[in-house]
Image (cartoon, grey):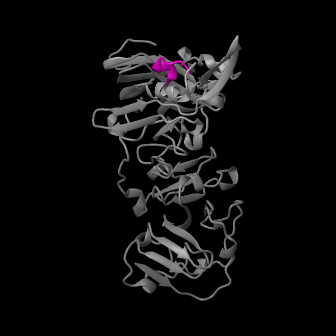
Amino acid sequence: MTRKIAGLAIASLAATFILYGCDSNGGGVTNANGVNSSNSSTNNDPSSKDNDDADNEGKKENDTIEAETLDDLPKCTSKKEGTIATVEDDGLDYYCYDGKWIGTVTTMTKLPSCTAKKEGDRIYVKKIEEVFYCSEDEEWVTTNDEDDPDKDINSSSSNKTKEKVVEFVDGVIWQPSYGRRAYTGETGIDEYNFLDEDAEGENGAGWWYKFLDNGEGGSSTAVGTFTDNGLQLEFNLAYTNWEEKMWTSGTDFGYYYAPNPYPFAGFGFNLKNDKKAMDITSFSQGICITYASSTTVKVAIASTATDTYGIAYEYNLSYSTSSTTAKLLWSKFTQPSYAADQGATVARATALGKAYALQIMYSNDQSGVTDYCGGSSLSTCQSYANAYGSSSFTVYKIEKYDGTTCGDSSNTL
């Protein structure tokens, strides 16, 4: 139900607003530049306007409100807590929170930069139905009860029981109960607020995503299935974009070449939102992974310092047909041999200091097939490529390793 609130056609400043939040000093609206744009009249602040429930008799809690101007909004009372209001004059939505009308954005990626000027500003993110405030650390932080410095502890919303999105266990990055999510340790992500605006992993942190070689002429596939026991990954490699090369040894001799690291297929999750980098060595000394695998696969750390040609620091995880736990230390990760061939070598400390994703990957390195098909026709090479085979890999648990034991395993890789 949408209820129209009509009022006097007061000359409004709202048309000039690009709304993001409310000023921490008293409810005035702040624009994109952080300038306080409160109306000068003492009675024009929509958070204190005396157009109360008497004008809205019969209105149900959390109905959508429409108003002609910002000044026409009714007072944000406890009964209206959580109500969305649309103002026709500026075409923006406002959210009733803690006695004030605050700005809204659709997703976390739409939040403006949190700067010192915006400290204390609060914004409602529609996609995840959560209010965030700009902290003194210049980060958007969820307003979970006492975490909001300006929250009225006596307001009704502060006493609401919030449902956890996922039950994180200390030190566990992923286990079956997490489903499609993985805990990355990023600031602002907790059990009640999990960034879900991009479940494919393009921007959001902690969501499993898939990556393939199809952008470079490959036709490999990867299928991931979440079960009550683990994450089942199925990889199948194939390469279609073979390049014809010629060499001369007496007579011309043709062969076909697939440049490393193609073909490949994999799964991973971003460590921070918007693929921002982090120093993964400050997060842990490595990981412990409980798994089963039909072949050797790569565990890789994708880095903004090494992502030319898809090169990452990685470790070949030996196959095990039964469940086993292995400890992988970051100090044991290396770059593949073709990194030097392509002039893309980067020191380990530099690469791991700019990590953006943890990946599980299957490529021609693990399949045992070389990247060339000498002396054969293209059709023969394609058959050869399609015979690369497949890999089945099951993840049961991934944990941080901080110098203590992982699970019941003493294996160190």
When the figure is inspected, residue 282 is found, relative to residue 7, above or below; the finding is: above
* Residue at x 54% of width, y 38% of height: 214
The outermost residue toward the bottom is 8
* Residue at x 43% of width, y 35% of height: 222
Assess whether residue 366 is covered by the magenta stretch: yes
Residue 10 % position (x, y): 65, 85
When the figure is inspected, residue 199 is found, relative to residue 19, above or below; the finding is: above
Say which of 190 and 325 sits in front.
325
The outermost residue toward the front is 251
* Residue at x 46% of width, y 20% of height: 367
When the figure is inspected, residue 327 is found, relative to residue 243, above or below; the finding is: above
Residue 113 % position (x, y): 66, 51
Residue 196 % position (x, y): 46, 49
How many circles with numbers are drawn on the protein?
Answer: 0
Q: Quadrant of residue 171?
A: top left
Say which of 34 and 211 sits in front.
211
Quadrant (top left, top right, bottom left, bottom right) of the N terminus = bottom left
Residue 15 appearing in the image: yes
Q: Is residue 334 left or right of residue 55?
A: right
* Residue at x 66% of width, y 24% of height: 245
Assess whether residue 262 is covered by the magenta stretch: no
Q: Which residues are magenta?
A: 363-372
When the figure is inspected, residue 86 is found, relative to residue 334, above or below; the finding is: below
Residue 381 % position (x, y): 52, 26
Q: Quadrant of residue 401?
A: top left
